[in-house]
């Protein structure tokens, strides 16, 4: 990933924060049929001696050939907030008109070897944690234990766990750090006024929190 120094994000807690906030990652590897991508909700575990940047965990259907590629190097892409940036928000646009649009975003690329885990207890722990996390904001959270135990056992036999101990992680926060602080503040304000709540407003908040002198 091309990443000029001004856009590079290397703080592990910040990278993990984006991955946790946007857990649907695109797992990319090169298999027998060429490049392939699977979109999976991940959890991120803390760093260990053999995974200095943390460990990603997820599961796939047993019928999915992905898990049979155990041992292959892979990359998981996590896309954070993103939005179109109009040149109307730049001071130079008002002075000379010499500006063009761009697109700002935050993204993480996480790399490591793929492992397959075919263990019922491990899978039960994973799906229990994932469920608890994603149900937490609901008025009446569903729990794995709400379903009959024999049914859950059957469902667990239909999936295989995957684990990726991360050996490299890169982050790119393209937030206009190469522009003046005035332009960064104007971008943040313009995005905050977007009439469609979502990525644009989230990006505006991220830019507002990271306004820095142009580098």
Image (cartoon, rainbow, N blue to C red):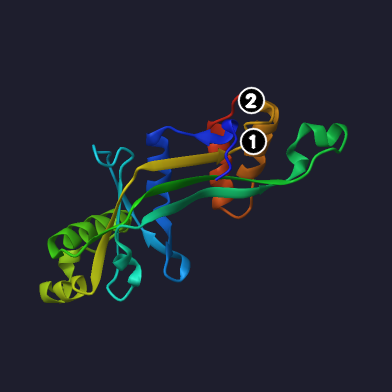
Residue 141 can be seen, yes or no: no
Instruction: Say left or right for 34 vs 165.
Output: right
Instruction: Relative to 149, say whether 25 is above or below.
Output: above
Label pair 1/2, CB-CB below 8 angstroms: no
Instruction: Say left or right for 38 vs 149.
Output: right
Q: Is the N terminus in the top left, top right, bottom left or bottom right quadrant?
A: top right
Q: Determine whether the residue tagged by mark 1 lies in a helix, strand or loop.
A: loop
Residue appearing at x 45%, y 51% in the figure = 78
Residue appearing at x 60%, y 55% in the figure = 196
Q: Position of residue 107 (x, y in %)?
A: 50, 46
The residue carrying pointer 2 sits among few (fewer than 14), some (14 to 19) or many (20 or more) residues within 10 Å by Cα, namely few
Q: Earlier in the sequence, mark 1 or mark 2?
A: 1
Q: Is the C terminus in the top left, top right, bottom left or bottom right quadrant?
A: top right
Residue 30 in which image quadrant: bottom left
Residue appearing at x 13%, y 61% in the figure = 121
Q: Position of residue 36 (x, y in %)?
A: 46, 66
Front residue of 15/140: it is: 15
Q: Position of residue 88 (x, y in %)?
A: 77, 42
> What is the distance, in whole Å, between disc 1 and disc 2 at their CAs?
10 Å
Instruction: Name the disc covering residue 215, or none.
Output: 2
Q: Determine whether the residue tagged by mark 2 lies in a helix, strand or loop.
A: loop
Q: Position of residue 151 (x, y in %)?
A: 16, 76
Instruction: Relative to 209, say whether 128 is above or below.
Output: below
The residue carrying pointer 1 sits among few (fewer than 14), some (14 to 19) or many (20 or more) residues within 10 Å by Cα, namely many
Residue appearing at x 37%, y 47% in the figure = 20
The residue labelled by disc 1 is 176
């Amino acid at each position: 990933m091309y990443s000029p120094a001004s856009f590079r994000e290397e703080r592990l807690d910040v990278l993990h924060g984006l991955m946790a906030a946007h857990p649907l990652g695109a797992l990319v590897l090169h298999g027998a049929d060429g490049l392939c991508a699977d979109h999976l909700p991940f959890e991120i575990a803390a760093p260990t001696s053999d995974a200095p940047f943390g460990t990603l965990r997820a599961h796939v259907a047993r019928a999915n050939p992905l898990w049979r590629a155990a041992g292959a190097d892979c990359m998981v892409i996590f896309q954070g907030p993103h939005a179109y940036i109009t040149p109307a928000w730049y001071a130079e646009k008002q002075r000379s008109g010499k500006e063009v649009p761009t697109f700002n975003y935050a993204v993480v690329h996480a790399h490591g070897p793929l492992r397959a885990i075919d263990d019922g207890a491990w899978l039960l722990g994973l799906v229990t944690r994932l469920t608890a996390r994603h149900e937490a904001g609901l008025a009446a959270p569903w729990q794995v234990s709400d379903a009959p135990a024999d049914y859950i056992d059957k469902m667990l036999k239909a999936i295989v766990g995957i684990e990726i101990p991360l050996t490299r992680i890169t982050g790119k926060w393209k937030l206009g750090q190469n522009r003046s602080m005035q332009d960064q503040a104007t971008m943040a304000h313009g995005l905050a006024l977007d009439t469609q709540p979502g990525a644009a407003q989230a990006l505006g908040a991220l830019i507002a929190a990271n306004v820095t002198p142009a580098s």
